[in-house]
Image (cartoon, rainbow, N blue to C red):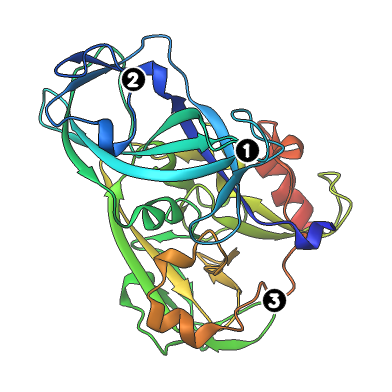
Amino acid sequence: MTQAHLPPTQNLPVFQAEAFVVSEGANLGDPIGCADDLMLDDVYRLSAAAETDRLTLNVLDDTHFTVAESSVRGQPGNSVHLDCAATFMSPDGQTTDTLVLVEVDAMGHIAQTYLLPMARLAPRTNYALVGIDTENLRTRIAHLTCARFTRGTHITLASGAQTPIEDLRVGDRILTRNDGIQAIRWIGEATVRAVGDFAPIRIRAGTLNNDRDLIVSPGHRLFIYQRTDRLGAGRSELLVKARHLVNGETVIVQDGGFVDYFELLFDTHQIIYAEGIAAESMLIDTRSAPVVPTEVSALLTAHTDAGLSGLDVTETLLDRPDAAEILRRASTR
Protein backbone atom coordinates (compact mmCIF):
# COMPACT_ATOMS: atom_id res chain seq x y z
CA MET A 1 0.00 0.00 0.00
CA THR A 2 1.41 3.39 -0.95
CA GLN A 3 1.35 6.41 1.30
CA ALA A 4 -1.24 8.04 -0.94
CA HIS A 5 -3.73 5.29 -0.13
CA LEU A 6 -3.22 5.09 3.61
CA PRO A 7 -6.29 6.12 5.62
CA PRO A 8 -6.06 9.43 7.49
CA THR A 9 -5.13 9.18 11.14
CA GLN A 10 -6.38 11.01 14.20
CA ASN A 11 -4.44 11.56 17.41
CA LEU A 12 -6.48 11.57 20.61
CA PRO A 13 -5.15 12.42 24.11
CA VAL A 14 -6.69 9.69 26.26
CA PHE A 15 -6.54 8.30 29.78
CA GLN A 16 -6.73 4.58 30.34
CA ALA A 17 -9.99 3.78 32.10
CA GLU A 18 -8.18 2.63 35.24
CA ALA A 19 -7.06 6.21 35.89
CA PHE A 20 -10.66 7.41 36.37
CA VAL A 21 -12.42 5.41 39.08
CA VAL A 22 -15.68 5.65 41.04
CA SER A 23 -14.94 6.98 44.54
CA GLU A 24 -18.57 7.22 45.68
CA GLY A 25 -21.70 5.49 44.41
CA ALA A 26 -23.15 2.26 43.13
CA ASN A 27 -20.09 1.25 41.12
CA LEU A 28 -17.59 2.03 43.89
CA GLY A 29 -14.05 1.10 42.84
CA ASP A 30 -14.91 0.52 39.18
CA PRO A 31 -13.14 2.39 36.37
CA ILE A 32 -15.09 4.31 33.75
CA GLY A 33 -16.75 1.85 31.40
CA CYS A 34 -19.37 1.38 28.71
CA ALA A 35 -22.71 3.19 28.75
CA ASP A 36 -24.62 0.09 29.89
CA ASP A 37 -22.46 -0.10 33.02
CA LEU A 38 -22.55 3.56 34.03
CA MET A 39 -24.75 4.90 36.81
CA LEU A 40 -25.82 8.52 37.04
CA ASP A 41 -24.67 10.34 40.20
CA ASP A 42 -21.66 8.06 40.67
CA VAL A 43 -18.67 10.20 41.64
CA TYR A 44 -15.32 9.67 39.89
CA ARG A 45 -11.79 10.80 40.71
CA LEU A 46 -8.77 11.01 38.46
CA SER A 47 -5.59 9.39 39.75
CA ALA A 48 -2.92 11.90 40.81
CA ALA A 49 -0.37 10.08 38.67
CA ALA A 50 -2.58 9.88 35.57
CA GLU A 51 -1.28 11.31 32.31
CA THR A 52 -2.79 11.28 28.87
CA ASP A 53 -1.17 9.29 26.07
CA ARG A 54 -1.82 9.56 22.38
CA LEU A 55 -4.17 7.01 20.91
CA THR A 56 -3.66 7.21 17.14
CA LEU A 57 -6.51 5.88 15.04
CA ASN A 58 -6.83 4.99 11.39
CA VAL A 59 -10.12 6.59 10.33
CA LEU A 60 -11.61 4.13 7.86
CA ASP A 61 -14.97 5.90 7.55
CA ASP A 62 -17.41 7.87 9.71
CA THR A 63 -17.82 5.05 12.24
CA HIS A 64 -14.91 2.63 11.81
CA PHE A 65 -11.53 3.06 13.46
CA THR A 66 -8.49 0.89 14.07
CA VAL A 67 -5.39 1.47 16.18
CA ALA A 68 -2.60 2.84 13.98
CA GLU A 69 0.94 1.46 13.91
CA SER A 70 2.27 4.74 15.33
CA SER A 71 -0.08 4.78 18.33
CA VAL A 72 1.42 5.02 21.83
CA ARG A 73 -1.58 3.20 23.27
CA GLY A 74 -3.41 0.15 21.99
CA GLN A 75 -2.56 -2.82 19.79
CA PRO A 76 -2.16 -1.85 16.12
CA GLY A 77 -4.97 -3.25 14.01
CA ASN A 78 -7.47 -3.59 16.85
CA SER A 79 -10.87 -2.00 16.28
CA VAL A 80 -11.90 1.01 18.36
CA HIS A 81 -15.55 1.87 18.99
CA LEU A 82 -17.07 5.13 20.20
CA ASP A 83 -19.27 3.94 23.05
CA CYS A 84 -20.76 7.05 24.66
CA ALA A 85 -20.32 10.63 25.78
CA ALA A 86 -20.25 11.07 29.55
CA THR A 87 -20.82 14.46 31.16
CA PHE A 88 -19.39 15.16 34.61
CA MET A 89 -19.95 17.99 37.08
CA SER A 90 -17.28 19.20 39.49
CA PRO A 91 -18.07 20.65 42.94
CA ASP A 92 -17.93 24.22 41.55
CA GLY A 93 -20.73 23.44 39.08
CA GLN A 94 -18.54 23.25 35.96
CA THR A 95 -19.45 20.49 33.51
CA THR A 96 -16.91 18.53 31.50
CA ASP A 97 -17.74 16.38 28.48
CA THR A 98 -15.79 13.20 27.82
CA LEU A 99 -15.94 10.36 25.31
CA VAL A 100 -15.57 6.68 26.17
CA LEU A 101 -13.74 4.62 23.54
CA VAL A 102 -13.47 0.84 23.59
CA GLU A 103 -10.66 -1.11 21.93
CA VAL A 104 -11.63 -4.60 20.77
CA ASP A 105 -9.21 -7.38 19.80
CA ALA A 106 -9.46 -9.80 16.86
CA MET A 107 -11.55 -12.21 19.00
CA GLY A 108 -14.12 -9.53 19.78
CA HIS A 109 -13.03 -9.13 23.39
CA ILE A 110 -12.55 -5.75 25.06
CA ALA A 111 -8.81 -5.10 25.19
CA GLN A 112 -8.91 -1.65 26.79
CA THR A 113 -11.27 1.22 27.54
CA TYR A 114 -10.17 4.84 27.20
CA LEU A 115 -11.49 8.18 28.37
CA LEU A 116 -11.10 11.16 26.03
CA PRO A 117 -11.69 14.41 27.97
CA MET A 118 -12.96 17.32 25.91
CA ALA A 119 -11.73 19.69 28.62
CA ARG A 120 -9.16 19.41 31.39
CA LEU A 121 -9.79 16.96 34.23
CA ALA A 122 -8.06 17.77 37.51
CA PRO A 123 -6.70 15.03 39.79
CA ARG A 124 -8.13 14.56 43.30
CA THR A 125 -11.35 16.31 42.27
CA ASN A 126 -14.80 14.78 42.59
CA TYR A 127 -16.69 14.51 39.30
CA ALA A 128 -20.34 13.45 39.45
CA LEU A 129 -21.71 11.69 36.38
CA VAL A 130 -24.68 13.79 35.26
CA GLY A 131 -25.22 12.73 31.66
CA ILE A 132 -24.81 9.76 29.31
CA ASP A 133 -25.28 10.15 25.55
CA THR A 134 -24.86 7.57 22.81
CA GLU A 135 -25.76 9.87 19.88
CA ASN A 136 -23.68 12.17 17.65
CA LEU A 137 -20.38 10.90 19.07
CA ARG A 138 -18.50 11.08 15.78
CA THR A 139 -19.26 14.77 15.37
CA ARG A 140 -17.63 15.55 18.72
CA ILE A 141 -14.33 13.96 17.71
CA ALA A 142 -14.50 15.38 14.21
CA HIS A 143 -14.32 18.92 15.56
CA LEU A 144 -10.80 18.17 16.84
CA THR A 145 -9.48 17.77 13.28
CA CYS A 146 -11.14 20.69 11.49
CA ALA A 147 -9.17 23.73 10.35
CA ARG A 148 -10.83 26.52 12.32
CA PHE A 149 -10.31 30.25 12.59
CA THR A 150 -11.43 32.32 15.55
CA ARG A 151 -13.83 35.26 15.66
CA GLY A 152 -12.19 38.45 14.45
CA THR A 153 -9.78 36.79 12.00
CA HIS A 154 -9.47 38.91 8.85
CA ILE A 155 -9.90 36.91 5.62
CA THR A 156 -8.76 38.31 2.26
CA LEU A 157 -11.60 38.72 -0.27
CA ALA A 158 -11.34 38.56 -4.06
CA SER A 159 -11.11 42.37 -4.06
CA GLY A 160 -8.11 42.32 -1.75
CA ALA A 161 -10.11 43.74 1.15
CA GLN A 162 -9.83 41.98 4.51
CA THR A 163 -13.07 41.11 6.31
CA PRO A 164 -13.64 39.60 9.78
CA ILE A 165 -14.61 35.98 9.36
CA GLU A 166 -17.88 36.39 11.28
CA ASP A 167 -19.06 38.87 8.61
CA LEU A 168 -18.58 36.43 5.73
CA ARG A 169 -21.55 34.75 4.06
CA VAL A 170 -22.01 31.70 1.82
CA GLY A 171 -21.29 32.78 -1.75
CA ASP A 172 -18.73 35.42 -0.83
CA ARG A 173 -15.73 35.32 -3.16
CA ILE A 174 -12.37 34.65 -1.51
CA LEU A 175 -8.83 34.91 -2.87
CA THR A 176 -7.07 31.54 -2.90
CA ARG A 177 -3.42 30.78 -3.55
CA ASN A 178 -3.79 28.04 -6.16
CA ASP A 179 -7.22 28.48 -7.75
CA GLY A 180 -7.74 32.22 -7.90
CA ILE A 181 -11.14 33.41 -6.75
CA GLN A 182 -13.43 30.83 -5.13
CA ALA A 183 -16.88 31.08 -3.55
CA ILE A 184 -17.56 29.95 0.00
CA ARG A 185 -19.91 26.93 0.00
CA TRP A 186 -20.47 26.53 3.76
CA ILE A 187 -19.54 28.27 7.00
CA GLY A 188 -19.45 26.33 10.25
CA GLU A 189 -19.56 27.98 13.67
CA ALA A 190 -19.23 26.63 17.20
CA THR A 191 -18.47 27.98 20.66
CA VAL A 192 -16.41 25.68 22.90
CA ARG A 193 -14.42 25.86 26.10
CA ALA A 194 -10.86 26.90 25.24
CA VAL A 195 -9.10 24.09 27.06
CA GLY A 196 -7.04 21.05 26.11
CA ASP A 197 -7.10 20.26 22.40
CA PHE A 198 -9.77 22.95 21.93
CA ALA A 199 -7.57 25.79 23.23
CA PRO A 200 -6.59 27.99 20.26
CA ILE A 201 -3.06 28.88 19.24
CA ARG A 202 -2.15 32.58 19.05
CA ILE A 203 0.55 33.47 16.52
CA ARG A 204 1.63 36.97 17.38
CA ALA A 205 1.81 39.66 14.68
CA GLY A 206 5.00 39.45 12.63
CA THR A 207 5.92 35.94 13.77
CA LEU A 208 5.24 34.51 10.30
CA ASN A 209 5.01 37.91 8.61
CA ASN A 210 1.34 38.10 9.62
CA ASP A 211 -0.20 41.59 9.79
CA ARG A 212 -2.02 41.00 13.08
CA ASP A 213 -2.22 38.23 15.65
CA LEU A 214 -3.60 35.07 14.03
CA ILE A 215 -5.58 32.77 16.32
CA VAL A 216 -6.50 29.31 15.01
CA SER A 217 -7.33 25.81 16.22
CA PRO A 218 -4.32 23.69 17.27
CA GLY A 219 -4.43 21.37 14.26
CA HIS A 220 -4.92 24.16 11.72
CA ARG A 221 -2.22 24.00 9.06
CA LEU A 222 -0.40 27.06 7.79
CA PHE A 223 1.13 27.12 4.31
CA ILE A 224 4.79 28.14 4.16
CA TYR A 225 6.77 28.67 0.96
CA GLN A 226 10.47 28.40 1.73
CA ARG A 227 12.70 30.44 -0.54
CA THR A 228 15.54 28.58 1.15
CA ASP A 229 15.05 25.18 2.81
CA ARG A 230 16.20 26.29 6.25
CA LEU A 231 14.08 23.65 8.00
CA GLY A 232 15.59 20.68 6.16
CA ALA A 233 12.23 19.41 4.90
CA GLY A 234 13.60 18.73 1.43
CA ARG A 235 10.99 20.84 -0.36
CA SER A 236 9.90 24.45 -0.62
CA GLU A 237 6.14 24.10 0.02
CA LEU A 238 5.13 23.10 3.55
CA LEU A 239 1.99 22.63 5.64
CA VAL A 240 2.70 23.23 9.33
CA LYS A 241 0.26 22.64 12.21
CA ALA A 242 -0.08 25.62 14.53
CA ARG A 243 0.40 23.46 17.63
CA HIS A 244 3.86 22.42 16.44
CA LEU A 245 5.08 26.03 16.47
CA VAL A 246 4.24 26.78 20.11
CA ASN A 247 7.26 28.29 21.87
CA GLY A 248 5.66 30.15 24.78
CA GLU A 249 6.66 33.56 23.42
CA THR A 250 5.66 34.39 19.86
CA VAL A 251 3.36 31.37 19.48
CA ILE A 252 1.31 30.53 22.57
CA VAL A 253 -1.60 28.39 23.69
CA GLN A 254 -4.50 30.68 24.59
CA ASP A 255 -6.02 28.56 27.34
CA GLY A 256 -9.14 29.38 29.35
CA GLY A 257 -12.63 30.75 28.86
CA PHE A 258 -14.55 30.12 25.65
CA VAL A 259 -13.67 30.51 21.99
CA ASP A 260 -15.80 31.04 18.88
CA TYR A 261 -14.52 28.90 16.02
CA PHE A 262 -15.42 29.22 12.32
CA GLU A 263 -14.85 26.78 9.43
CA LEU A 264 -14.76 27.85 5.78
CA LEU A 265 -15.55 25.26 3.12
CA PHE A 266 -15.00 25.57 -0.64
CA ASP A 267 -15.58 23.21 -3.57
CA THR A 268 -12.05 21.91 -2.95
CA HIS A 269 -9.50 22.24 -0.18
CA GLN A 270 -7.88 25.66 -0.54
CA ILE A 271 -5.10 27.84 0.77
CA ILE A 272 -6.56 31.23 1.66
CA TYR A 273 -5.16 34.29 3.39
CA ALA A 274 -5.83 35.09 7.05
CA GLU A 275 -4.24 38.13 8.66
CA GLY A 276 -2.04 38.31 5.58
CA ILE A 277 -0.57 34.80 5.67
CA ALA A 278 -1.52 31.58 3.91
CA ALA A 279 -3.62 29.04 5.81
CA GLU A 280 -5.79 26.10 4.81
CA SER A 281 -9.55 26.03 4.51
CA MET A 282 -11.57 23.09 5.80
CA LEU A 283 -10.86 19.73 4.18
CA ILE A 284 -13.63 17.15 3.99
CA ASP A 285 -12.23 13.69 4.68
CA THR A 286 -13.26 10.71 6.80
CA ARG A 287 -12.17 12.56 9.96
CA SER A 288 -14.03 15.83 9.43
CA ALA A 289 -17.03 14.75 7.33
CA PRO A 290 -19.46 14.35 10.29
CA VAL A 291 -19.20 18.09 11.00
CA VAL A 292 -20.63 19.05 7.60
CA PRO A 293 -24.43 18.87 7.09
CA THR A 294 -25.42 16.03 4.79
CA GLU A 295 -27.11 18.35 2.31
CA VAL A 296 -23.85 20.30 1.94
CA SER A 297 -21.48 17.35 1.64
CA ALA A 298 -23.78 15.78 -0.97
CA LEU A 299 -23.08 18.77 -3.22
CA LEU A 300 -19.32 18.47 -2.72
CA THR A 301 -18.75 14.87 -3.74
CA ALA A 302 -15.63 15.91 -5.70
CA HIS A 303 -14.05 17.70 -2.72
CA THR A 304 -10.30 17.02 -2.80
CA ASP A 305 -7.12 18.28 -1.22
CA ALA A 306 -6.29 20.18 -4.44
CA GLY A 307 -2.73 18.87 -4.66
CA LEU A 308 -1.82 19.71 -1.06
CA SER A 309 -1.21 16.13 0.09
CA GLY A 310 2.34 15.26 1.04
CA LEU A 311 3.22 18.77 2.22
CA ASP A 312 2.87 18.12 5.96
CA VAL A 313 5.98 18.69 8.08
CA THR A 314 6.70 16.12 10.76
CA GLU A 315 6.65 17.28 14.37
CA THR A 316 10.26 16.10 14.74
CA LEU A 317 11.54 18.81 12.37
CA LEU A 318 9.61 21.45 14.32
CA ASP A 319 10.62 20.31 17.80
CA ARG A 320 12.76 23.38 18.50
CA PRO A 321 11.96 26.77 20.09
CA ASP A 322 13.07 28.74 17.03
CA ALA A 323 10.98 26.81 14.48
CA ALA A 324 8.65 29.76 13.80
CA GLU A 325 11.59 32.12 13.34
CA ILE A 326 13.31 29.68 10.98
CA LEU A 327 10.16 29.49 8.85
CA ARG A 328 9.74 33.27 8.87
CA ARG A 329 13.28 33.76 7.57
CA ALA A 330 12.96 30.90 5.10
CA SER A 331 9.87 32.50 3.55
CA THR A 332 11.46 35.93 3.09
CA ARG A 333 14.99 35.18 1.91
Dot 1 amino acid type? Ala
Would you name the residue on which mark 1 appears?
106
User: Could you tell me which quadrant the C terminus lies in?
Assistant: bottom right
Where's residue 188, x and y in %? 36, 70
Dot 2 amino acid type? Pro
Instruction: Left or right? Give the position of 257 relative to 280.
Output: left
- CA distance for labels 2 and 1: 23 Å
Where's residue 130, x and y in %? 14, 35
Observer able to see residue 318? yes
SS for callout 1: loop
Neighbourhood count class around disc 1 (C-alpha, 10 Å): few under 14, some 14–19, many 20 upward: few
Q: Residue at x 44, y 30 (%)?
A: 114
2 or 1: mark nearer the eye:
1
Instruction: Left or right? Give the position of 40 relative to 151.
Output: left
Neighbourhood count class around disc 2 (C-alpha, 10 Å): few under 14, some 14–19, many 20 upward: many
- CA distance for labels 3 and 1: 37 Å
3 or 1: mark nearer the eye:
1
Viewer-nearest residue: 34 or 305: 34
Neighbourhood count class around disc 3 (C-alpha, 10 Å): few under 14, some 14–19, many 20 upward: some
Instruction: Left or right? Give the position of 91 relative to 145.
Output: left
SS for callout 3: loop
Would you name the residue on which mark 2 appears?
31
Would you name the residue on which mark 3 appears?
306
Q: Please say if 37 is above or below 123.
A: below
Dot 3 amino acid type? Ala
Q: Residue at x 67, y 85 (%)?
A: 179
Where's residue 69, x and y in %? 72, 38
User: Could you tell me which quadrant the N terminus lies in?
Assistant: bottom right
3 or 2: mark nearer the eye:
2
Q: Please say if 83 is above or below 227.
A: above
> Mark 3 vs mark 2: which is more N-terminal?
2
